[in-house]
Image (cartoon, rainbow, N blue to C red):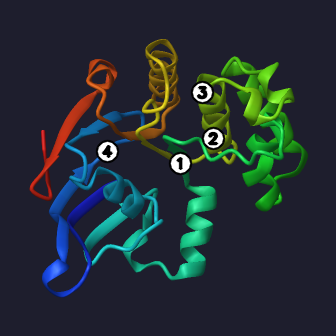
């Protein structure tokens, strides 16, 4: 995964604010990279651009062999479904579905079939939420919900995992567990990028980059 000269601004006229100004990034398969920065520095925006959730104003972004900056809308949808897994601070589990149903949802949208169901079972067991997966999200702890969200992000076997403040809503113990799981995901050969305020994430990351002034330093 690489990004070169990435720029992004929001607003118009005098209210226009540039959050990324020529940001460069390289992340290799199996590498765990933590991106630190103050609130509003552009960490989430960077992940959204890498994952095709937003479009850059300028620059080159290549993820898993795909030139994301050149993709049309339909191509971006397929890219997000098959190449990238997302984990967010607020879990985004559908409240009317059980944990297991939430995990399998991306595979169902992509017509994953029986192979995906077995992969989902293995992920749920591996992440230690076998019992929690039978229940609705509303009765689960934050740590259980985030583990299920991580299983959902991995269900389609993405090449890249992007995690935006994944421990921000968790207690210290649960947060530590999620970080350890992300470390394991990188160990499986995936590129993992986490945007975080948590200094604890730096202890297990292969590299730590700081986003300031629209650029990445590290």
Quarter holding the C terminus is top left
Q: Which residue is mark 1?
A: 86
Q: What SS does tag 4 mark?
A: loop
How packed is label 1: few (under 14 Cα within 10 Å), some, or many (20 or more)?
many
Mark positioned earlier in the residue sequence (3 or 4): 4
- Find residue 142 and name its label: 3
Q: Is residue 81 left or right of residue 170?
A: right
Residue 48: x and y in percent read 41, 60
Mark positioned earlier in the residue sequence (4 or 1): 4
Q: CA distance from mark 3 to mark 4?
A: 29 Å
> Outermost residue, right direction?
114
Residue 86: x and y in percent read 53, 48
Q: Please identify the quarter of the rendering in which residue 213 is found.
A: bottom left
Q: What SS does tag 2 mark?
A: helix
Q: Is residue 99 left or right of residue 182?
A: right
In contact (CB < 8 Å): disc 1 and disc 2: no
Q: Nearer the viewer, mark 4 or mark 1?
A: 1
How packed is label 4: few (under 14 Cα within 10 Å), some, or many (20 or more)?
some
- Find residue 27 and name its label: 4
Mark positioned earlier in the residue sequence (4 or 2): 4
Name the foreground residue: 202 vs 172.
172
Q: What SS does tag 3 mark?
A: helix
Q: CA distance from mark 3 to mark 2?
A: 18 Å
Q: Nearer the viewer, mark 4 or mark 2?
A: 2
- Find residue 154 and name its label: 2
Name the foreground residue: 60 vs 182.
182
Mark positioned earlier in the residue sequence (1 or 3): 1
> Outermost residue, bottom direction?
13
Q: Nearer the viewer, mark 3 or mark 2?
A: 3
Q: CA distance from mark 4 to mark 2?
A: 18 Å
């Amino acid at each position: 995964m690489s990004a070169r000269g990435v720029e992004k601004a929001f607003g118009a006229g005098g209210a226009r604010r540039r959050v990324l100004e020529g940001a460069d990034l390289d992340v290799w398969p199996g590498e765990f990279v933590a991106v630190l920065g103050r609130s509003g520095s552009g960490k989430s925006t960077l992940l959204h651009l890498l994952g095709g959730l937003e479009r850059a104003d300028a620059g080159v972004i290549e993820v898993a062999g795909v030139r994301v900056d050149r993709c049309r809308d339909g191509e971006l949808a397929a890219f997000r479904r098959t190449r990238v897994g997302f984990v967010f601070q607020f879990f985004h589990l559908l409240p009317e579905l059980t944990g297991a149903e939430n995990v399998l949802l991306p595979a169902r949208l992509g017509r994953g079939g029986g192979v995906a169901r077995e992969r989902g079972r293995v992920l749920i067991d591996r992440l230690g939420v076998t019992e929690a997966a039978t229940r609705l999200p509303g009765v689960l702890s934050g740590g259980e919900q985030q583990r299920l969200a991580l299983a959902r992000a991995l269900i389609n076997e993405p090449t890249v995992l992007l995690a935006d403040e994944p421990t921000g809503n968790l207690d210290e113990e649960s947060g530590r567990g999620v970080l350890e799981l992300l470390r394991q995901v990188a160990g499986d050969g995936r590129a993992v990028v986490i945007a975080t305020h948590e200094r604890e994430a730096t202890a297990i990351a292969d590299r730590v980059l700081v986003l300031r002034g629209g650029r990445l330093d590290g």
